Image (cartoon, rainbow, N blue to C red):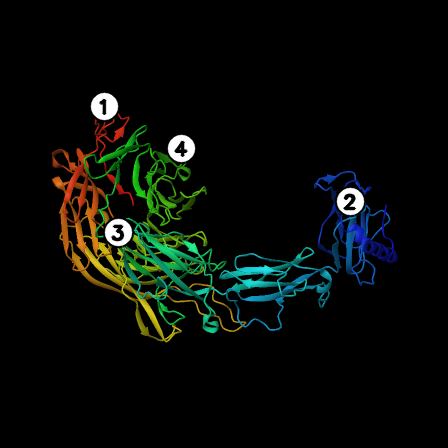
Amino acid sequence: MHRCSSGFLLALAAAIVVALTGCLGKGSSNPSNGGVTSVTLSPGSTISLDTGATQVFSASGRDANGRTVLGVNIQYLVGVPLGTTSAAPLTIASNGNACAGTWDASVAICSPGTPGIATVQAVINGISSPVTTVYVHQHIASIQIEPAESQAPQYECFSQGQIWQFQGIAYDGSNPPVDITNSVGPMNWSANNSAVALLATSAPGTTLLPNQVQVTARTPGITNLFASVSGTTSAPYAYTTCLIQAIYLQIGGQGQAGNSITVNNGASVNITATAIDTLYEFTGATLKTPPLTWSTTHPEVASFGGNTNSTGNNTVTTRANFGGTTVFASCTPPTCNVGVLPGLPIYSSDGQQPNQTQGYGAISIDVVPNTTAKPTTYTAWAATTGCQDAPGCSSALFAVTPGLTPIGIIVNVPRTPNSMMFNHSSSRLYFGSDQGLMYTDLTASSPSVTMVSNASVPCNVALCGKLLTVSDDGKLVVVSDTASTPSQVYIYNGGGASTPVDLILSNAGETATAATFSPDLLKLFILTNLGNMYVYSTVDALTSVSTFAPGTDVEFSADGSFAYVAGAPASAGAPANAVSAYSTCSLPDIGSVDIGSVATSSTPLQIFPSPVLPPPFEQNGPPPFQQDSFFWTTQNIIALEPPNIELLTAEFTQNPIPYPAAQGEPLQLTCNPPLILSFTKGASFNLGQPNFTPVYTQLVGDGTELLIVAGNIPAVLLFNVGDGTTTSIPLVGNANPLSASATTDGTQVYVAACDQYPNNDPTQPCAAGSVHIVNTVSQGDYQQVPYVNIDNNNNPNMCNSQGTNAPLCLPNLIAIKPQ
């Protein structure tokens, strides 16, 4: 057994190793080395050991082809760094077992030695390994992180790209503690949110000590820095890349004024964003690579090719559909303002940019047809609920297109649908049913219906229920399950393989009645029949907010920073009927903040924020605004209150988080909800109809017309928002609408209707029905399409496998495929 029993022998061995470096360190072959050309020692590089601690070394040799050479004799040599006069603080046995001190005769007990630095090499057949440096030190009781530069940071955060050095100080367990940093060797550095800070222990042109690290601020957010060595990790050191405070938008760069633009369909619009952080008041610097999320309120009209980037600009492309939309940018967790809980989104706002030009919080885009272009032909898809969940009953889904052969592809639907909805970004059609969620991709040459689960139970696997909404990116589908106890809400990801989210509503008898994703997809607002609003996100925990009365509809503002909730007073004691505003951002234990409400004449069943924005208003004002002037956005909201329409107006502005003061004062890491400066009720208009229940309503075009289809009203109603007048387009044969769908510009409406009841008694099952194709511009109800299966002897029954005397199933669900 080889062992170094004295400091003299250790020093001698080290000298021999140094003297032989010229021939051993080259890894060259010689006639007696058994083919070994390189030696690897493990652990390599550097290690750190407490005095009295042990470490097992191992080594292997490889030949010129990289193959391990077996049966070799390994020698472990211990030395000290050049210039060191003290003895090596480490001994190593022939089997590679090392002691930070000295072994006893049996190589079983390691006696602590004195702190110092040792070098270890392995030699096989005359070929030596690279050196491993071993730092032997007293036990580390704690490590503290502190700035390493001569001056302390001036502020509590670092702007993107700013570089600062930190160091770890190691202390032993003495009282008072003694700094033993110089003896512990290089420290390992890490951050729990690596996107926030880039860590480097070496950098060109910079000399860092073994206990130091260079940190470059990257993505806005917070993280903890950690230093560790020899099994001891420091307490976390809070580090913040300054949060984004404000984002300003412009059309097409600095030369394009205004917050609105009109373009032909298929055109592209470039949007630029300028983002400033919370230190802007002191540094005047903007973010060179702001990690922004780009959103649109009507993705069927216009959408971004990529919803996230850090270039500060993006291109929104208009689609073949016509109408209006607003687009905006945001700093949306978890990719921006990283690590802040609750999530801290910052939405683009109106205001003066650093270059003194006007910036905007949202850009409104009006997409119109080219005057020379041929009118677009739309296809609708019709289905039936007629199977009524009967076992073995399947039904038809068929395409309807104007023309001589209006019925196109017929697809078999294995379960009875109760709702039907296209996603916005592609041609996938979803079906809700009591037996589970289904979908079909209509871009396929021979489309078929896919069931999310082949089994209809349990419901949390099959995803039973009614469709509530589809996210703007087309991937997430929300289903309300009212059959299970307690009621549940499922979120299905149609764009990936992730397990569906199952949200259980907390109160007995509570069911979800409406839901909407924020355009940036940060939050999902869910309304229930018991007057609660659940707020779900992947960043924050599920919370509920009492709206004091059941909400009927929820829609997001033009800039995505808050939602309008219809039919729900914002607080106890408020008017019984109202539209209220709730922030997208959360406070601790508060999922959404009530920021204002307006009383309405009656309960709105639906609300429609306008996609057209007037120029923002500028006014000098007092605090909380830090600038001499501030800007606000105006948005009109159309409220449907049968038999009336009511016009509402909200004026609002963003309320940025304050910039940090000097070092030592805490940062604000919670949201400042938007400010509703005024929320007012305008004119009310009677539609000239008795009270009705709408089956379909849509604000079309550039927001100047509201299209309404209602049960027991045999017409399509068109309300002109500008002058308050209502026109109607009668349905042929006084047909009774059952469902409807319209193009985004409102020029074409497909109405699934009952054309005939037995003895004209609408309480009886419908005896004949069809899809009415209505042109609202000139042609009226110009084509009626009853279901006919030309491949099955012109069978008029949409239900199959129900025998010869089965009731007639007719189209009563309809949806137009987006272009």
Whichever of callouts 2 and 4 sits on the residue coming sooner in the sequence is 2
Q: Is residue 797 visible?
A: yes
Residue 111 visible in the picture: no
Judging by the rendered image, the residue that carries numbered circle 3 is 322
Q: Nearer the viewer, mark 2 or mark 4?
A: 2
Q: Secondary structure at mark 3?
A: loop
Q: Position of residue 298 (x, y in %)?
A: 31, 52
User: Sequence-wise, which precedes: disc 4 or disc 3?
Assistant: 3
Q: Earlier in the sequence, mark 3 or mark 1?
A: 3
Where residue 364 appears, as percent x and y from the top left, is: 30, 59
Residue 367 picture quarter: bottom left
Q: Amino acid at mark 3?
A: Phe
Q: Which corner quadrant of the image does residue 193 belong to?
A: bottom right
Task: Give the class, few, some or many, for how many residues have Cα within 10 Å of label 1's Cα (few <14, many ≥20).
Answer: few
Q: Is residue 676 left or right of residue 755?
A: right
Helix, strand or loop status at disc 2: loop
Q: Where residue 768 sits: x, y (%)? A: 17, 34
Distance between mark 1 and mark 4 Cα atoms: 28 Å
Quarter of the image that includes the C terminus: top left
Q: Secondary structure at mark 4?
A: loop
Q: Does dot 1 land on a helix, a strand or a loop?
A: loop
Disc number at residue 454?
4
Q: Which residue corresponds to mark 1? A: 804
- The disc, 2 or 3, on the residue closer to the chain's N-terminal end is 2
Amino acid carrying label 4: it is Asn
| Mark 1–mark 4 CB contact (< 8 Å) | no
